[in-house]
Amino acid sequence: MTTFEYDDDTAVARQQDGTYRGEVTDRWGAIGGTVNGGYLLGLCTRALQHTLDRPDPLVVSAYFLRPGRLGPAAVRTDVVRTGRRVSTAQARLVQGDKEVLRVLAGFGDLSTHQGRTRVDSKPPELPVPDDCVDVTGGRSLPGLSIVDRLECRARSVPGWVQGSPSGDMTAEFWMQFRDGREIDVLAVPSLVDCAAPVVLEDGAMGSSTIELTVHVRARPRPGWLACRVSTSNVMDGLHEEDFDMWDSDGTLVAQSRQLAMVF
């Protein structure tokens, strides 16, 4: 049976006291030498799914309190409300005696949702993935082990990778796991925080997420996901980042916004 890195690295085991135990691995290193926040969110999302016994995260809001570190982690969950269509719970990821991440999420079953629909947003008009280039030029980057887990392809290599930031804080690209794992609904909240921050194109060295909210709109179909990420305002060292994601059939899968600190 094939096993995939994301599943292994976000696996949690329920203990007798109701706490979930997991392990933060070194395969999701991000800019600045920290553990990627989206990956840490994946540990919490998996524990919340077990707690609520609902298949789909509908909305996930996460506050990043301090950097995560490699090694054991505990995820403590509490049910807030169990509803007919949406159930809500919170999770706290703790390492040692320090709370690293706090998450409030609503889960449901997207397959049962029906009603009025109007979608005005459009996916990016990208060449097919085979006609795009790896955004890192097909090479690993020191300290950024996350680029060995995820493949992102765009029309051209971004300016920041080449040492010449373009000043355009919008990026469009395809995304998939490098090991062949299909992106499912449980991975989506992680992946909106796994791409390089677009403030790199403004000359920033990186950014650190303070708060992230993800709205999951559909279960993604197999294949590459088309993504658009943008920042419009950098003010006093803080910036917002908006991320939209469509599946291989052009269905809107997720939207997110985060507030982050530039460094």
Image: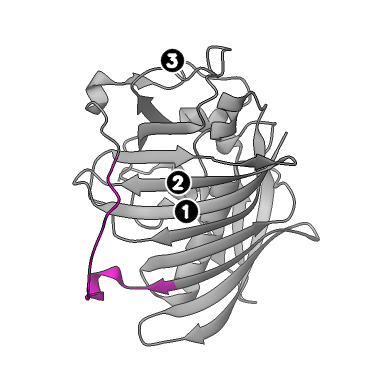
**Cα distance between the residues tagged 3 and 2:** 22 Å
Residue, disc 1: 256
Residue 243 tag number: 2
Mark 3 is surrounded, within 10 Å at the Cα level, by few (under 14), some (14 to 19) or many (20 or more) other residues, namely: few
Q: Nearer the viewer, mark 3 or mark 2?
A: 2
Residue 137 tag number: 3
Q: What's under tag 3, amino acid-wise?
A: Gly
**Cα distance between the residues tagged 2 and 1:** 5 Å
The vertical placement of 62 against 192, above or below, is below
| Range of magenta residues | 107-123
Count every numbered label the image shows and give the total: 3
Across and down, in percent, residue 253 comes to 32, 54
Instruction: Tell whether position 218 is magenta.
Output: no
Across and down, in percent, residue 238 comes to 69, 44
Query: SS at mark 3?
Result: loop
**Cα distance between the residues tagged 3 and 1:** 27 Å
- For the question of whether residue 187 can be seen, the reply is no
Q: What's under tag 1, amino acid-wise?
A: Ser
User: Which callout, 3 or 2, points at the residue further toward the start of the chain?
Assistant: 3
Across and down, in percent, residue 233 comes to 60, 42
- For the question of whether residue 57 can be seen, the reply is yes
Query: SS at mark 2?
Result: strand
The vertical placement of 182 against 20, above or below, is above
Q: Quadrant of residue 22?
A: bottom right
Query: Which residue shows up at 29% across the image and 53% down it?
Result: 252
Mark 1 is surrounded, within 10 Å at the Cα level, by few (under 14), some (14 to 19) or many (20 or more) other residues, namely: many
Query: SS at mark 1?
Result: strand
User: Which callout, 2 or 1, points at the residue further toward the start of the chain?
Assistant: 2
Instruction: Tell whether position 118 is magenta.
Output: yes
Across and down, in percent, residue 54 comes to 38, 74
| Residue sitting at the far right | 97
Q: Is residue 157 left or right of residue 90?
A: left
